[in-house]
Amino acid sequence: MNDNDFPRNGDLAQRIRHLLNASCEAIDRPTADRLFQARQKALARHRPSARLGIAGHGGFSIDPILPLARTVVVLVGVVLGVAGVSFWNSVETAMELGEVDVALLSDDLPVDAYLDRGFDAWLQHSSQQ
């Protein structure tokens, strides 16, 4: 083929199909059988891409969406993990504060002593010693 043989009006696919069909007739039987076996193996290994669409309205492939979907799933997992750790931390803090409250309320000291401003001064003075 040279430059003059290339079609100018877009029927390149038809010309290639015609040339391939013409050359198929010249192949001997054993070679054709080997090519057929190779084609069957290739078709068995081929995984068709998933396509969604309505008949007559085209379609789209979900293959480009899969990496984005994986990224979204990972990000959602990370966000849920961080939220879970934050929630667990707040529960632990509330439990610790509850233990402090129980210890203070079960102490021999009356509750009014904790409300007295002089008591805070006494605590600071006694903690410095």
Image (spheres, grey):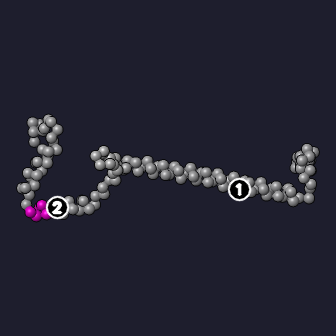
Residue 129: in sight, yes or no? Answer: no
Give residue 12's position: percent from left, percent from top.
15, 41
Give the residues drawn in magenta, as a range: 29-35
Q: Amino acid at mark 2?
A: Phe
The reply to whether callout 1 and callout 2 are in contact (CB within 8 Å) is no
SS state under label 2? helix
Residue 111: in sight, yes or no? Answer: yes
**117 shown above or below 77:** above
Give residue 26's position: percent from left, percent from top.
6, 56
Q: Is residue 121 magenta?
A: no
Q: Quadrant of the N terminus?
A: top left
Structural crowding at the residue carrying mark 2, measured as other residues with C-alpha within 10 Å and reported as few (<14), some (14–19) or many (≥20) = few
Give residue 25's position: percent from left, percent from top.
7, 55
Structural crowding at the residue carrying mark 1, measured as other residues with C-alpha within 10 Å and reported as few (<14), some (14–19) or many (≥20) = few
Task: State the residue position of label 2.
Answer: 36
Between 117 and 9, the residue placed more toward the observer is 9
The residue depicted at 13 percent of the width and 63 percent of the height is 33
Q: Is residue 30 magenta?
A: yes
Between 125 and 92, the residue placed more toward the observer is 92
Task: State the residue position of label 1.
Answer: 92
**107 shown above or below 68:** below
Q: Amino acid at mark 1?
A: Glu
The residue depicted at 64 percent of the width and 51 percent of the height is 86
Whichever of callouts 1 and 2 sits on the residue coming sooner in the sequence is 2
